[in-house]
Amino acid sequence: MSVATTARPTTAARRRPRTTQEGERPSVRSRVLAGVVMVLVALYFLVPIYWLVVAATKSTADLFGTPGFWFADLQLGQNLVDLSTYDGGIFWRWMLNSLVYSGLGSVLMTLVSLASGYALAIYRFRGRAFVIALVLGSMLVPQTVLAQPIYQLLVEIGLNNTMLGVLLPTIAYPFGVLLAFTYAQASVPQEIVEAARLDGAGEVRTFFSIGLRMLSTGGVTILLFAFIASWNNFMLPLLVLSDTRLQPVTVGLSGWSQAAITVPGLQTLVVVGALLSVVPIIAVFLSLQRFWKSGLSAGAVKM
Amino acid sequence: MTTATATAVRRTPRRRPRAGGGQRRAPYLFLAPFLVLFAVFTMAPIVLAVYSSFFQTRRSGLGFGGEGEVVFAGLDNYVRALSNDGFVAGFGRMLGYGVVQVPVMLGLALVLALLFDTALVRWKPFFQLSVFMPYAVPSVVAALIWGFLYQPRVSPIVEGLRSVGWDVSFLSPDVVLWSLANVAVWSVTGVNMVILFSALQSVPREIYEAARIDGASELRTALSIKIPMIMPSLTLTFLFSIIGTMQLFNEPMTMRAVTSNISGDYTPNMAIFQATTLGGDVNLGSAMAVVLGLVIFVLSLVVQGVSRRRNGADR
């Protein structure tokens, strides 16, 4: 940006004095306009989250009886107690399940993807072109359309209504492999792998001690998107899990939301539960911002 | 995107002298977990779904008790799927929804990315984060929140609009599809904006410099330089958006709790779910899943084909 300022030819500046090109001072009018647009946009995206926070502090009566965008009597503590005790504290069981499905699932998925991407980028071997074609081709296979077929398969092999049945299908994810492949090509130089070999390191050890480390930025990006995707996973667990105690929090909350039609007071628990279910994911995102942003610009864009 | 990957592949050295046994086995070892799981949980289900879509379970007697008899049904399940009014209507809804939601969402994401790429916006990190934030909210939870914001009894929005004399009902039969589209726009604009913004950031700045010397305005630069430069990313986000649209399930399924105007077979995916669970007809569900999969596949190919022809010159 500063380079542009110093390099700007004076003639061009004189010719178009009000241009808002980078490096020049944008006109006040266009800046105010952009500011207004940004505030409106931020309102649209943040207000629903703000509403959720406010609503989570209200009693059921106040939820329906007081202005939605402002606080009434603070009931958050009581709501949390109610949430934790309702139906034997099943909400926390759901949170734990989600953590297992998403946490364990995304870590395994990332490892599997990185190992595959690394192998495709570093080695020349028979069948490599086939695997790449397979990965690219299966990107076009829509994930939720797979839910029904996977459910059928799980019934066949007896894994329906088990945690493994929800966990295992999420681990092999072609998009993760493609991202890992792109990152590995860009960030693991062949020379370093050669050097490790000369030093006597085996292939597996080279991958774990050098490859993984060089892939860490890309890995964090994949991990985050995998985590979000599985925290979002809904159709498959809804099909597969009939036992409510095995469900992830999204399926559980959705069930409560259906039941709230007849069970008074459940609305409040849905609201508080929704808020709590968002907290971990937002915390993870905020704390890892630096990584996924640079990871995105390094990898996804180059595809 | 395939072409780009292929060029990158070519750049790495092709031959390495004297590869040892470990080096020959290593790639297969690293790929094994992916390939095995992929075979079991992607290939096998597809094969099974196609297979089971050609069969039917005929129950003997009154349909109670007793093992049903599995018989070859030919294309019967497909005929039933395609003559199922709900399933077909679901495709119609998806089409209308996609035609509106995808351009609105991507247009918003593109305008925001372009704005963030200028010097016009202050407090950039804050505004970028607020646009991105909803992406961290699971779509089921997003649908729960908006479900409340659409309900006349709870919603401050409905109340506010009513107080200025505008009586809207977000959940009425004609409007509910667009209310669903709004939830999706709210959820995914942010991530598309980030992808497009990253693409814009990686365009060499000298190009803008040249444009400015030629006297191009900011708007002109955006239209004739920035947008063409990020066309590959735009195509990618477009493709993913279409695929996402065709798979719509989480939001409508969740929002059924607040309105009776979303039927159990409102979208193709919901029809598949309904046929498989409530209907207890796995074979019909399979046929529907195969049809939906094929439709999405063909749509993706069309989008890719069109964009490839457009970008043909520089690829």
Image (cartoon, grey):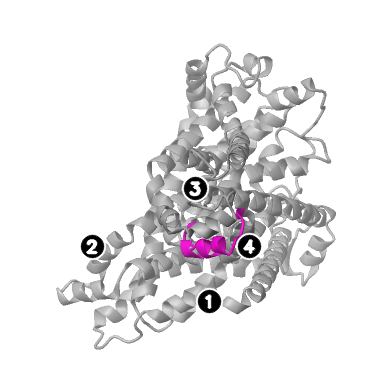
In the image, A79: left or right of B270?
left
Disc 1 and disc 2: Cα gap in Å? 32 Å
Q: Name which quarter of the figure residue B92 lies in.
A: bottom right
Name which residue type carries label 4: Leu
Disc 4 and disc 3: Cα gap in Å? 20 Å
Q: Chain of mark 1?
A: B
| Dot 4 and dot 3 residues touching (CB under 8 Å) | no
Q: Residues within 10 Å of mark 4 (few under 14, many from 20)?
A: many
Which of the two discs, 1 and 4, labels the residue nearer the N terminus? 1
Q: Chain of mark 3?
A: A
Q: Residues within 10 Å of mark 3 (few under 14, many from 20)?
A: many
Query: Where residue A143 appears, x then y in whole percent?
Result: 58, 58
* Depth order, front residue of A108/A176: A176
Q: Secondary structure at mark 1?
A: helix
Numbered badge on residue A209 = 2
Name which residue type carries label 2: Ser
Label 3 sits on residue: A228
Query: Where residue B83 appears, x then y in whole percent?
Result: 85, 61
Name which residue type carries label 1: Thr
Residue B226 visible, this orientation: yes
Q: Chain of mark 2?
A: A
Numbered-mark total? 4
Label 1 sits on residue: B3
Over which residues does the magenta segment extend? B201-218
In the image, A198: left or right of A167?
left
Instruction: State whether discs 4 and 2 lie on one chain.
Output: no
Query: Where residue A32 appears, x then y in whole percent?
Result: 60, 37
Instruction: State whether discs 1 and 3 lie on one chain.
Output: no
